[in-house]
Image: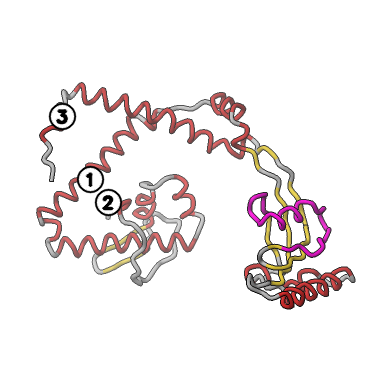
Amino acid sequence: MKRFLLLPVIVGFIIVTFPVVILAEDSSTVLATAGNLKITQEDLDESLKVYSTEIQNAVKANRQLQQKFLQRLVELELFSSIAREKGIDRIPAVKKRMEILVNDFLSKELLSREVVDKIKVSEEDMKQYYKANAEQFKKPEEVKARHILIKVKRDASEDEKKAARKKAEEILSKIKKGEDFASLAEKFSDDPGSAKRGGDLGFFSRGRMVKPFEDAAFSLKPGEVSGIVETRFGYHIIKVEEKKPASIQPFEAVKDTIKNELIKKVQNEKVKEYVQRVMKERKVKLYPERIKMN
């Protein structure tokens, strides 16, 4: 089974259940069968090569993705086989579309081999880009916090607002007496997203939260608990657990990103030059004025 040409154009997973065999080390190991169809580890590995390195690594590192990819490959082979049995591939309009897809793939493969793969980016080029674009790799200050929200409706009456604030003050009093913040958040917080995690909001930077909440959180030191903070959502009690100062990501951490960025910049110009050269060598002539308009 060696037909992988059209794999990239299949978008999404078709929901069909097939028996899935866990991936094996031996390249000859059969991973799936359907009638005369047989897919081996080698087939799966080859089909993965049409995707980017990032996708390949993600699939190889995740058992669930491996199984989904195998099912996708089975679907592709099985359904295309059925289509051929029914003569769908011999319908003129279908043949033309298949030809376009094949030509598109071959064109990209040619440009990849003749242009993109030959582009080299040196370590020095990457370091110069890193130094010249330091702001691009800046990580803003972040804070890790928990909170307890006592929700107040936008159309709440004054009595309802007073009752909500009183409840928040009672909870704050419990915290000051030493009761566990996370347990109180789980019990009393009206924020369904964080309450079940003990009010944990994880790390966030400025601009992620409403202003009064943000100002309070970033003014606290790790371990400190705020007073009652009012926002449009209601009354909050915030506990900061950790802070990360603003920093520049190290070169090694962004090296691949820089390399890809530099390749993209060079690639566009190199591809343009290649296309122009080939068009000239092959004496291509275009007659756009002859295009029939609907």
At x 57%, y 24%, the residue is 124
From the top left corner, tell me how far across and down residue 215 is, in percent: 74, 53
Q: Is residue 110 left or right of residue 221?
A: left
At x 45%, y 45%, the residue is 53
Cα gap from disc 2 to disc 3, whole angstroms: 29 Å
From the top left corner, tell me how far across and down residue 228 is, in percent: 79, 65
Q: Compared with residue 272, is residue 225 higher up or lower down, i.e. above or below?
A: below
- As for residue 265 lying within the magenta part, the answer is no
Bounds of the magenta span?
A: 204-230
Query: Which mark lies nearer to you, 3 or 1?
Result: 3
Cα gap from disc 3 to disc 1, whole angstroms: 23 Å
Q: Tell me the amino acid under the disc marked 3.
A: Leu
Residue position for label 3: 286
Q: Is residue 258 left or right of residue 142?
A: left
Secondary element at image label 3: loop
Circle 2 crowding by C-alpha within 10 Å: few under 14, some 14–19, many from 20: some
